[in-house]
Amino acid sequence: MELHGDCFDRMLQIIAREDTGQATIVRLADDQLIGGLLLLYGLHPLDFATRVKSALEKVRPYLRNNSMPRESTAASSDRSPFIWLFRICC
């Protein structure tokens, strides 16, 4: 498993040297399968908070359609996200 991680790390280093390398890495990480693999090896280019915010953006339309327009997020020391949903009433 360590060999695989080292290989993926080297590939990302080579890609990053290109003019559009960082953008390519972010696009790769946005792919569900590749992004999961990068997470597994600790190579995902986006930090934890950014990934949580991105996930919330994807579900925000659903939350609004179900009268849950507001949320607050935080992370515990073990990096588990806490998401509080609350409804704003009259």
Image: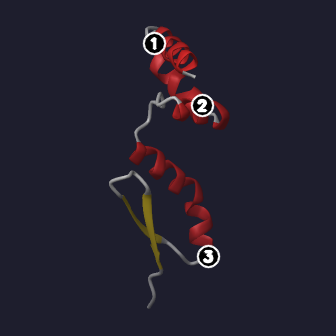
> Is the image coloured rainbow, by chain, by secondary structure, or in one colour?
secondary structure
Quarter of the rendering containing residue 29: top right
Density class for disc 3 (Cα within 10 Å; few <14, some 14-19, many ≥20) is few
Tell me which amino acid carries mark 3: Asn
Q: Earlier in the sequence, mark 2 or mark 3?
A: 2
Q: Give coordinates of residue 20: x percent, y percent.
A: 48, 15
Place of residue 85 in the rendered image (x, y in percent of width and height, measured from the top left)? 47, 73
Which amino acid, mark 1?
Gln
Read off the residue under disc 2: 37
Q: In the image, is 28 to the left or to the right of 10?
A: right
Residue where numbered disc 3 is placed? 66
How far apart are the alpha carbons under marks 1 and 2? 16 Å
Residue at (58%, 34%) from the top-left corner?
A: 35
Contact between marks 3 and 1 (CB within 8 A): the answer is no
Of residues 54 and 43, the one nearer the viewer is: 43
Of labels 3 and 1, earlier in sequence is 1
Instruction: Report, in whole angstroms, how far the alpha carbon at label 2 lies from the one at label 3.
Output: 33 Å
Q: Which residue lies furthest to the front in this view?
A: 1
Which residue is painted at 58% across and 59% down in the image?
59
Dot 3 falls on a residue whose secondary structure is loop
Measured in 3D between alpha carbons, the distance from the residue under mark 3 to the one under mark 1, in whole angstroms, is 43 Å
Query: Which label sits in the foreground, 3 or 1?
Result: 1
The answer to the question of whether label 2 and label 3 lie on touching residues, with beta carbons closer than 8 A, is no
Residue shown at 44%/82% (left/top)?
88
| Marked residue nearer the N-terminal end (1 or 2) | 1
| Front position among marks 1 and 2 | 2
Query: Who is closer to the viewer here, 17 or 39?
Result: 39
Looking at the rendered image, the quarter that the C terminus falls into is bottom left
State the image coordinates of residue 31 (x, y, percent, origin top left): 63, 34
